[in-house]
Amino acid sequence: MEVEREWKRYERQLGLIGKHGQKKLKRAKVFIAGAGGLGTAVLTYLAAAGIGKIEIVDKDSVHLSNLNRQILFSEKDVGKEKAWAAVKKLRSLNPHIELKAKTEDLLLTCLYERVSSFDVLVDALDNFSARYILNRASLHQGIPLIHGAVRGFYGQITTVLPGKTACLRCLFPGSPDLVQPSVLGPVCGLVGCLQATEVIKLILGLGSLLENRLLLYDGLRGTSEEVEVQRRPDCQDCGGPAFFMGNSRT
C-alpha cells in the first residue's frame, strides 16, 4: 500500500519519464550547497520529484529578512539553522526520500572526499569564495556542477561538466562579489527551478544541458539570452592536469 502511494505521488511525471526514469531519480544522490533563495527552490522541487538522497549544507540561521525569497521557511523558523529547518519541511513534503543536513562553512571544509559519493553538485550559494571551493571539488571528483546566481532582477545558470566544459573559474577568473546583493524573491525561484530542471535532465540523460552556455535572465525586461563560453587554457582551476583529476560522470 505504501509503495502504491509513493508511485501515485509521481503520477503526473511518470508520463514523461516512466517508472524506469523515476527509479533513476530514486537512486540519485544530490549535494546542495546553500539553503537560501536559490537553495530552497531547488530543494523543494528535487524533493517533490523524488530524488532519493539529498544533502544540504548551509552554516547560517534563518533571519526575518530571508523570508521574501527563502520559500521553505516561515516566521516560526527565525533563529533556527537553515539546513535543519529545510530538512524538517522537506520531510513533510516527501517522506519517501533520504535527507541530511550539515551546518558547515564551506570555506573551512575539505569537500573533495565529502562529495565523492554524489552524482550532482548544486551551487546555490551567495558568494564566489565558497563557489570556487565547490568548483574545485567538482573538478577533482569529476562530478557535474549546476551553477546558479542572482542579483536584483537578474539571474544566471550554467552546467559544468568536468573535463568537457568551461568551469566556473573559466567564466569568472576573479570574484565579482562586492556587497551583499539585493534580491527579488521570484528571480531566486525562477533560477532555482531552472537548476532543479538541469539536475533532473542530467540524471535522466534527457534533452540538452547548459553545456558551455551561460543562460542570463533579465527580470526587468522579461527576457533571457545565452552566452557561449569555453574553457580557458590558463584557468587556475581546470586549465592544467595538475588541477583536473577527475573524470566526468555524465
Image (cartoon, grey):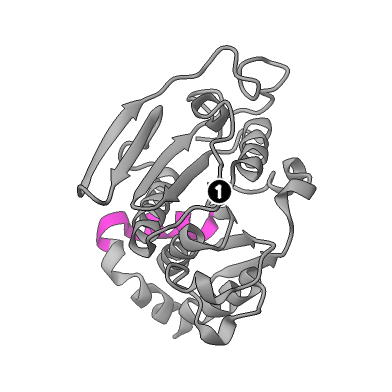
Q: Residue at x 48, y 43 (%)?
A: 146
Displayed quadrant of residue 14? bottom left
Residue 194 pos. (x, y %): 36, 51
Q: Residue at x 42, y 38 (%)?
A: 158
The magenta segment is: 15-28
Q: Residue at x 20, y 49 (%)?
A: 222
The relative height of residue 139 versus residue 183 in the rendered view (above or below) is above
The relative height of residue 5 versus residue 205 in the rendered view (above or below) is below
The relative height of residue 45 versus residue 245 in the rendered view (above or below) is below
Q: Is residue 80 left or right of residue 125?
A: right
Residue 245 pos. (x, y %): 69, 25
Front in this rendered view, residue 100 or 41: 41
* 244 within the magenta span: no
Front in this rendered view, residue 120 or 183: 183
Q: Amino acid at mark 1?
A: Val
Q: Quadrant of the N terminus?
A: bottom left
Displayed quadrant of residue 80? bottom right
Residue that carries the numbered disc 1 in the rendered image: 179
Residue 239 pos. (x, y %): 61, 16
